[in-house]
């Protein structure tokens, strides 16, 4: 269908109805995502009422087609609704810049624009380069702060962004969350905002409470740390720059965990090395109750020794703090404070000189303690006996050799740790299984080797009752043959058969293994317990048969009630036990007529079914209450107890 002009407002603008087949979307639409559900709802509205507001298009040069300037959502919904054409405002002379500007402006001035759509449109306007925050604020009638805050919403992960459009969280709450990185946002969503989260759910909370909880649970208080925080003052990950509620003197909270950890580790490491340069005789140490593993690992990689702190360290004297003149009311008070400070400095110098002399003489040992958030210097008095040993050159050589040995051990430990991590990434699927790898398998299988087979695999003089050690396993591997391999593999199978129980696959494997290696023993075991089962099964079947018989009279009672009733004879007087309980409602209603009816004498009646029933019941009761003889009972009891004990074992 061709475009049909309806009216012309200006030379460059026309109102027309255009075929949807001639229209295509543009690549500068600020809206990039379209919710399928909302499109379906709009399509239903268009089917009922048609398009209420025309879309904007411009001609594509050299063709009969049109490009959408604004209104792509209405265009998509019309396609879903099955429409063939759509009302459009045609801008016949519109440049690319003007088209993009008009698209942004139209989106920003829509009444039904969602917060996320507005954020995307504002970001597109700034990114286009035709606006800065000031000019855009004038254009849309909003403040610069409003625009900056809205644009921050584009930092949200999609899961949280959807919660704004569905109004499950407020824009204020979303703005607070948008100030943090993807890692924190993801954790906040999964832990506190996701569907199905009932405990500690943050939906419905106001922005100030969400901000407080994120600071408490996901950030680090910078005031507790001593590294250079000059870069943090303007960092976007510092909460003090996120318009949060900080009191005077607050340094903010860091939400960039990796950056914070790197700065803190570097500060502690540099301070420790600097302190060691000032006190060359000092030793590095750590406390297991105030541990900084990252710094310790870094110092070890740098070649330093770190020992575990044992006992108490006396603190090394701290340098006095100089007085500040602005904290005193007059010059006289300040002069007195300076004089006192100089006295403390002199005393500190003398104390440090004394400790240095003692350290050089070996009377004390200086220790630099690596702590979680700081580095401290302390000392410990060296006992006289230890000093004497230290003056012995041989003892000093032994100490140095021990250090060298430990350094080698550390190198090996680090190599093993890194190899264990890297081997998980290696491609091991293509190469052939080697003989060395085969021996490695047997090394681990030997953990299941039974003691009675030690001699069979070559350990003829072993007396230890403990499990095989690594050297013994390696000795066995050096002399592997077909027989020892079979013993090791089968002991491994037997060890794992311990996990067999009634219905699992291991039980099937166990029985299959036993059938191959001990068929007669397995047959005897099965026969023994099958015999016990058959006897018990027979007794159960007998009990079931008796119980089934006992239910037969109950089944015939309804038939007896519905059978024709014989007229009572005057000679036969019903007994209390026979007549009273079995009188039915029918018999009760017939009774008056029976009184007026002449009765004929009857011969002596044979016992009825009801009269015979007690005899049958007594016979059944005797059968049910049958008791075995003492010898039979003892045999049954002994058999059952043994069966239960073996089953438990």
Image: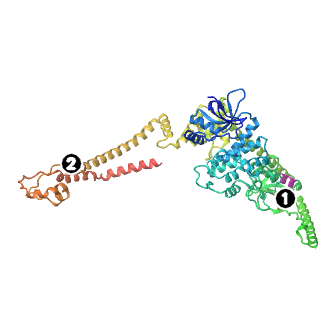
Magenta: main secondary structure: helix
The reply to whether residue 459 is visible in this rendering is no
In this view, 446 is above or below 587 = above
Residue 436, image x, y percentages: 67, 33
* Total marks in image: 2
Q: Which residues are magenta?
A: 270-276
Looking at the picture, tell me which residue is in the foreground, 393 or 3.
3
In this view, 165 is above or below 589 = above
Looking at the picture, tell me which residue is in the foreground, 167 or 204.
167
Among the 4 quarters of the image, the one containing residue 492: top right
The reply to whether residue 546 is visible in this rendering is yes
Q: Secondary structure at mark 1?
A: strand
Apparent side of residue 269 relative to residue 482 in the rendered image (left or right): right
Q: Residue at x 61, y 54 (%)?
A: 201
The residue at the far top in this view is 62
Which mark is on residue 111? none
Between marks 2 and 1, how big is the CA–CA gap? 107 Å
Is disc 2 surrounded by few (<14), some (14 to 19) or many (20+) residues within 10 Å? few
Looking at the picture, tell me which residue is in the foreground, 389 or 103.
103
**Residue under pointer 2:** 559
- Closer to the eye: label 2 or 1: 2
Apparent side of residue 559 relative to residue 59 in the rendered image (left or right): left
Q: Residue at x 32, y 51 (%)?
A: 631
In this view, 1 is above or below 121 = above
**Quick check: is 263 in the magenta stretch?**
no
Question: Which numbered disc flags the more N-terminal residue, 2 or 1?
Answer: 1
**Residue under pointer 1:** 366
């Amino acid at each position: 269908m061709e475009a049909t002009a309806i009216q012309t407002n200006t030379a460059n603008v026309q109102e027309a109805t255009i075929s949807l087949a001639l229209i295509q979307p543009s690549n500068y639409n600020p809206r990039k995502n379209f919710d399928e559900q909302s499109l379906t709802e709009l399509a239903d509205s268009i089917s009922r009422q048609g398009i209420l507001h025309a879309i904007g298009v411009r001609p594509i040069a050299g063709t009969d087609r049109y490009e959408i300037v604004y209104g792509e959502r209405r265009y998509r919904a019309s396609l879903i609704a099955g429409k063939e054409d759509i009302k459009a405002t045609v801008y016949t002379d519109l440049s690319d810049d003007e088209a993009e500007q008009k698209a942004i402006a139209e989106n920003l001035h829509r009444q039904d624009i969602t917060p996320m759509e507005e954020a995307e449109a504002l970001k597109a306007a700034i990114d286009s380069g035709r606006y800065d925050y000031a000019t855009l604020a004038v254009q849309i009638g909003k403040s610069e702060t409003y625009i900056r805050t809205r644009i921050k919403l584009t930092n949200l992960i999609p899961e949280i962004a959807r919660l704004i459009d569905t109004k499950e969280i407020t824009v204020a709450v979303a703005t607070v969350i948008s100030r943090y990185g993807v890692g924190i946002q993801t954790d906040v969503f999964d832990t506190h905002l996701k569907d199905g989260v009932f405990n500690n759910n943050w939906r419905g909370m106001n922005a100030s409470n969400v901000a407080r909880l994120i600071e408490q649970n996901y950030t680090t208080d910078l005031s507790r740390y001593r590294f250079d925080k000059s870069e943090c003052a303007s960092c976007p990950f510092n909460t003090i720059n996120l318009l949060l509620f900080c009191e005077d003197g607050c340094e903010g909270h860091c939400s960039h965990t990796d950056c914070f950890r790197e700065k803190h580790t570097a500060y502690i490491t540099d301070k420790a090395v600097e302190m060691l340069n000032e006190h060359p005789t000092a030793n590095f140490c750590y406390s297991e109750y105030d541990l900084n593993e990252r710094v310790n690992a870094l110092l070890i990689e740098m070649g330093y020794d770190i020992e575990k702190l044992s006992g108490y360290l006396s603190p090394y004297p701290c340098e006095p703090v100089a007085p500040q003149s602005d904290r005193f009311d007059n010059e006289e008070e300040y002069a007195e404070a300076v004089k006192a400070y100089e006295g403390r400095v002199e005393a500190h110098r003398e104390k440090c000189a004394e400790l240095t002399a003692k350290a050089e003489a070996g009377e004390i040992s200086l220790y630099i303690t690596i702590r979680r958030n700081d580095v401290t210097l302390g000392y410990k008095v060296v006992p006289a006996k230890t000093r004497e040993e230290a003056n012995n050159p041989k003892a000093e050589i032994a100490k140095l050799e021990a250090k060298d040995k430990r350094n080698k051990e550390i190198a090996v430990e680090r190599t093993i740790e890194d190899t264990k991590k890297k081997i998980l990434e290696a491609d091991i699927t293509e190469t052939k299984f080697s003989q060395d790898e085969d021996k490695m398998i047997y090394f681990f299988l030997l953990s299941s080797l039974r003691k009675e087979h030690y001699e069979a695999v070559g350990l003829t003089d072993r007396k230890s009752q403990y499990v095989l050690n690594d050297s013994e396993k390696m000795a066995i591997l050096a002399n592997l043959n077909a027989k020892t391999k079979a013993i090791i593999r089968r002991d491994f199978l037997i060890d794992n058969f311990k996990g067999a129980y009634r219905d699992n696959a291991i039980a099937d494997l166990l029985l299959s293994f036993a059938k191959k290696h001990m068929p007669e023993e397995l047959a005897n075991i099965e026969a023994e317990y099958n015999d016990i089962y058959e006897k018990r099964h027979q007794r159960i079947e007998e009990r079931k048969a008796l119980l089934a018989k006992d239910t037969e009279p109950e089944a015939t009672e309804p038939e007896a009630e519905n059978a024709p009733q014989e007229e009572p004879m005057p000679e036969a007087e019903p007994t209390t036990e026979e007549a009273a309980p079995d009188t039915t409602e029918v018999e009760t209603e017939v009774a008056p007529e029976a009184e007026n009816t002449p009765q004929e004498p009857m011969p002596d009646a044979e016992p009825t079914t009801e009269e015979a029933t007690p005899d049958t019941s007594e016979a059944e009761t005797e059968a049910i209450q049958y008791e075995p003889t003492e010898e039979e009972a003892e045999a049954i009891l002994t058999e059952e107890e043994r069966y239960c004990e073996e089953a438990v074992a």
